[in-house]
Image: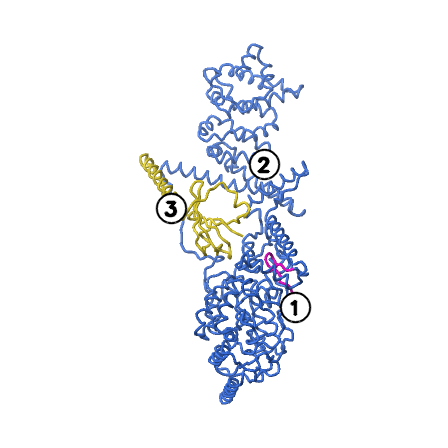
Amino acid sequence: EKHLVLLRDGRTLIGFLRSIDQFANLVLHQTVERIHVGKKYGDIPRGIFVVRGENVVLLGEIDLEKESDTPLQQVSIEEILEEQRVELQAKQESEKLKVQALKERGLSVPRADTLDEY
Amino acid sequence: GSPSADDDWQEAHERLAELEDKPVSNRERDGGADDDTDLLGDPEDALAERLTRLVIDSELEDPAIMQAVQTRGPTQVGERSWWGCCRPSRCLADSLSLLQQPGGLNSSIWDSSAVLQRIRGPLLAQEMPSVSVLDYALPQRPPQPREEERDPSERVLPRRSSSPVIGSPPVRAVPIGTPPKQAAVPSFNQQILCPKPVHIRAPMQQRYPAPYGERMSPNHLCNVPNSSLLGHPFPHSVSPVLTHLQRAQLLGGAQVKLPSLPSCIFLAASCAGRMSPSQFARVSGLVGSPLPSVSPKLLQGRVGQMMPPASGFRAFFGAPPAPPPSQPQHPLGPGSHLQNLRPQPQMFRPDTTHLHPQHRRLLHQRQQQNRNQHRSLNGSTGDRGGHRSSHQEQMRKDPYANLMLQREKDWVSKIQMMQLQSTDPYLDDYYYQNYFQKLEKLSAAEEVQGEGPKKERTKLITPQVAKLEHTYKPVQFEGSLGKLTVSSVNNPRKMIDAVVTSRSEDDETKEKQVRDKRRQTLVTIEKTYSLLLDVEDYERRYLLSLEGERPALMGERKQKICDIYDNLRGKVPGQERPSDDHFVQIMCIRKGKRLLARILPFLSPEQAADVLTVTARNLPFLIKKDAQDEVLPCLLRPFSHVLYHLPLGTVTSLVQQLTNLPQSASAPANPHLTAVLQNKFGLSLLYLVLSRGEELQSSDANTELMQDNQWTELMLMATRELLRIPQVTLAKPVSTPSNLISLFSRYVDQQKLNLLETKL
């Protein structure tokens, strides 16, 4: 009954799917936002979510038995947020370097978020 | 007329006053006979009664209700009240009291509303809707004659055999002893589209009771039932609506005139911009009667006048999701899917044909598990006890489950399946079809090998609908002159007037010419590709078609092949084909080469030979052009197939072309041959040709081959050349045919043969 929803912005929500419609708008109950960094993950309880269909990437049911055996390690919220920030920073750094290198060679790659729409 | 109305009003008012004065004695007495004289003594009831009067401001005074309120216990009243919004008689009251359930255990989201309402005055919650609607809908309406009102209240309402909580046994939707007064029915038959299928009932319920708890504004109450009704004006809502339709009838005639104002607004709002399953959801008789659907599931089986879905779906979805209303005893219907399990004998098998087979299996498994669980739970506790315990357990686990009715789920999946409909799946979803065909073949093969459990890899069974011809008829409005051009999906309006102007020849520069030529070639390739795809498809169509159509299909196919060939070679059919140019151009483009590879099997031998010859003739050039793409080797296989059918003469000429021999003696090197030999494709092709020649030679012992000097000469020269070329520059062929050695052995002596051997 628990479902895992992946959103377009990369967020992962886990909750009980209460309602759905033809646009894939979802109503999730007792939702928990799960942040993954490496092998660790952290949960943030969020409550009830109503998700607009166009932002849903995929939705799947969680097998409750399999949910327990996972190689991932759960950490506290603060920790995972910290990890996420660090990871984000690292990504940004590498991205900057890449763009720099490409610029030197005369190429320019459009940024991903501007590409997102199309 | 109004005087009479006033009189009635006054009368009613007097009665009310009377009532208030009477003592509290007859609380427990059932009010079957003495409806009018029953009384409220309770402070709570007094409050309720006062408030009732506040709202009802005239006629409808039903002491029976108040009496029923008393007999009903304090628990769960609010909830029941929704059900008992019509005038409950004694029986109703009795049955309601039977339904007392311990509050805590069965807590569901619906129950909480009851808890809220309990304190507020159950009467109001219960009676307000039924009454206020009437009032506010038709303020002008003269109060109903009291006889009418009293009449229905005396009729026996059905004994409620179960609680309206989710998961209880189904309630008979049609009350037993339905009052014969059906006159009001036509007035309810308004067809209203059900725009919004899904809605959450719980929050609504909770929301409204809270605010109006103290204030008891009738407007709120009026709105609540209406809006909730409209909030999910979904087919299944018809059922609760209907029952209350009938209940409302009990109240007397055409009191409920629809739609009342708030309902109108709501309906309009929810209609906007939402795809409505209009084909299959027409709620007739939207009733203003107040049924916030506490548990419409119970009445799920009754759809009332729900129109069947379009016939296309019908066939597909097996049993129609809505059993006809003629079966009042119908069990839960599709709702009995997972959670609402009750061991009813006529369990309606949920319609799951559209689900993926594996999914369906899982669902049924779970169902079985649940059933077993519940059976063990129920044991011998009997019907209702068992129900309740299993139900309680479910509720304990997840009170929020089943917010979506099975009907709603079906509706959504119907929409999704509708999108998958296709008249020609091979056209619309070619890769999917092929993929699953391959999978099926694999699994079939596996199965043949071993007796292992057959893994089910069946694909989602998508509905296949015959192609319907929709001739677009532009929308017409009444009374307008002529036709309005309203642009729609089927009739798009021209927005931009783009005019194609062809450039004059003079302006073009060389570059442009080249570019244009290349573009033309590309276009040719694309056109030829389309033809090719059609031709490849003919086989499948052939199998599907009827006998009579087949010759026509074959003819078409042949024609297309000819067209392809023409395209390839350049469409100058009149004279001898002087230029290979067109072909070469095509071959310069990677896609063109791939195209050729696919086309070759379809060409006739002569045509294929021709193609080969041209290729061989221009091979160095092509090789040069292919340096980047390296696609030529893909042609080897089809070429070799072609070669199989070639007679020696052709082969000879091929070799000639390939090697560009004989040459004038003066030329020291044979650039053509060199190029050929240095290229993988070229060399492989050469080998292929040579081996073919050898085959022919060896097979046909007594043929003119031996007498064919040309071949011999060629071979001699070829071998000489091969010997000459340093080994290093020789390319690595794709495959070296085995009979080459024997070929060469005819023409050279042993020494050279060894040399050759080492080289190759």
> Residue B478, percent across and down?
49, 70
Asked if one can make out residue B152 in the rendered structure from this viewpoint, the answer is no
Q: Which chain does the numbered disc 3 sit on?
A: A
- Magenta highlight: main SS: loop
* Residue B346 appears left or right of B210: right
Q: Secondary structure at mark 3?
A: helix
Position above or below: B447 against B262: above
Q: Secondary structure at mark 1?
A: loop
In the image, which lettered chain appears yellow? A
Q: Which mark is residue B326?
A: 1
* Residue type highlighted by circle 3: Asp
> Residue B180, percent across and down?
63, 78
> Which residue is labeled 2 in the image?
B602
Question: Mark 2 to mark 1: distance in Å?
Answer: 63 Å
In the image, which lettered chain appears blue? B
Q: Which chain does the numbered disc 1 sit on?
A: B
Between discs 2 and 1, the one toward the N terminus: 1
Q: Which residues are magenta?
A: B327-342
Q: Nearer the viewer, residue B89 or B26?
A: B26
Nearer to us of marks 2 and 3 is 3
Mark 3, Cα crowd under 10 Å, few <14 / some 14-19 / many 20+, is few
* Residue type highlighted by circle 1: Ser
> Which residue is labeled 3 in the image?
A113
Asked if one can make out residue A88 in the rendered structure from this viewpoint, the answer is yes
- Name the residue at 46% across, 34% down: B589
> Are the residues under marks 3 and 1 on the same chain?
no
